[in-house]
Image (tube, helix red, strand yellow):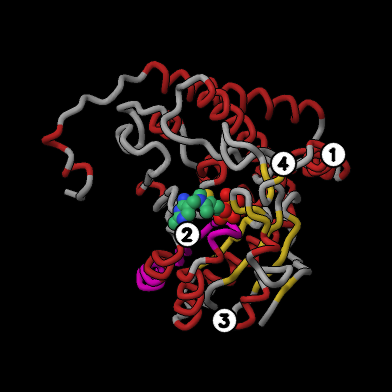
Amino acid sequence: MGKDTNNATMLSADQKITLYRNLVRANHFDLCFIRRIMAGKLVGFYHPGQGQFAPQVAACSFLNKDDILMPNHRGHGLAHLISKGVDVKTYVAEHSGKATGCCKGRTSYHFTYPEYGVFSLSGFIGHSLAPSVGWGLACKKNNRGQIAMVCFGDGASNQGAFHEAMLMTNNWKLPVVYMIENNGLAIFTDIASTHPTADIADLAKGYGMPAAIVDGQDVIACAEASLTAIAHARAGKGPYMIEAKPHRFMAHAICIPDLVDCTPRPDAVVEELKKRDPIVVCRERLLGEGILNQELIDRIEAEAVQEVEEAERFADESPVPELDMSDTSKLVYAD
Ligand SMILES: Cc1ncc(C[n+]2csc(CCOP(=O)(O)OP(=O)(O)O)c2C)c(N)n1
């Protein structure tokens, strides 16, 4: 067991187009949330996903509906959700504090979507790690071939719960895929000052689990690794770690400065990173392979814009929730 940097999984042309489409949709929903928070239409914070969509889309585009998904907070799970097939207009409404939201407009981005197997997203970093053992155990006991996909950042991997989860899922050979979105930053902290080696995936060897390291700007590479990991987990061989290394193009959250260790990130550095925008990298590759053409590119773009417009309209036209203190416990406990 150890690091696997050469993945041999082949993707079909349809699968590659799905990945490209989901990148474009993720980008438009992310831009929509950036617009909405600046316009005072979003409740709480927004941590933009620009630059980081490739591992998110790759991890979730080929999951089954009853697979469990724990998305990362970067981009507030938008890319993860749309890739898993969630109709996110009720999430746009949720984050806008509207009664039609998936959790009745009470949660901003601390939501769940049980009907889509999404449990849960939270602003508590590493919130998904300890529960990943429970979800993995549930998947194994259900015996229906489900897996749990758990997405989180490099900052979360520094928590104690990360190590406990790795030990337990490995010891019990639970069907869990850990997708680490390692953008090298945790708010203002450079990973070099918190992690002793270049790769978080080095840790996998100690747990006896397989791991892959992939280019986080390349959605095809991320998807090949994801499909290998998902097949491994579904076959009952235990958990699998993927460390994708994408770049974060914007500050940690909207309206805070873009610092690294107390120093502003130079514009020139960010501009250099943006040359490998995951959408551009994927589009150029698929054009070269003859899988995409301009007509299809334009159609995918137009459909994404329309989908976002419809979701925004739904949120804007929805009512705010009635405040009724007598029903608060109903929203906390299942009936
Ligand atoms: C339990 C907990 N500790 C600290 C924080 C403050 N915090 C918010 S985001 C963040 C960094 C997360 O970094 P990473 O996991 O690498 O994800 P990224 O934001 O880089 O995508 C921290 C420390 C928090 N929200 N929750």
For the residue with label 3, is its CB less than 8 Å from the closest atom of ligand 1? no
Q: Of tags 3 and 2, which is closer to the observer?
A: 2
Q: Which residue is mark 4?
A: 264
Type of the residue with mark 1: Leu
- Give the percent coordinates (x, y) of residue 94: 38, 32
> Magenta stretch: residue 146 in it?
yes
Is 22 drawn above or below residue 66 in the view shown? above
Residue at (35% x, 36% y) in the render: 102
Label 3 vs label 2: CA separation?
Answer: 19 Å
- Please report whichever mark, 3 or 1, sits nearer to the chain's N-terminal start: 3
For the residue with label 4, is its CB less than 8 Å from the closest atom of ligand 1? no
Q: Of tags 4 and 1, which is closer to the observer?
A: 4
Q: Which residue is mark 1?
A: 287
Label 3 vs label 1: CA separation?
Answer: 40 Å
Residue at (39% x, 36% y) in the render: 108
- Give the percent coordinates (x, y) of residue 168: 45, 78
Label 3 vs label 4: CA separation?
Answer: 37 Å
Q: Which residues are magenta?
A: 137-156
Residue 30 visible in the picture: yes
Q: In screen coordinates, is 136 left or right of 261?
A: left
- Give the percent coordinates (x, y) of residue 145: 46, 67
Type of the residue with mark 3: Tyr
In this rendered view, identify the residue nearer to me: 49 or 311: 49
Residue at (66% x, 46% y) in the render: 52
Label for residue 126? 2
For the residue with label 2, is its CB less than 8 Å from the closest atom of ligand 1? yes
Type of the residue with mark 2: Gly
Q: In screen coordinates, is 289 left or right of 233?
A: right
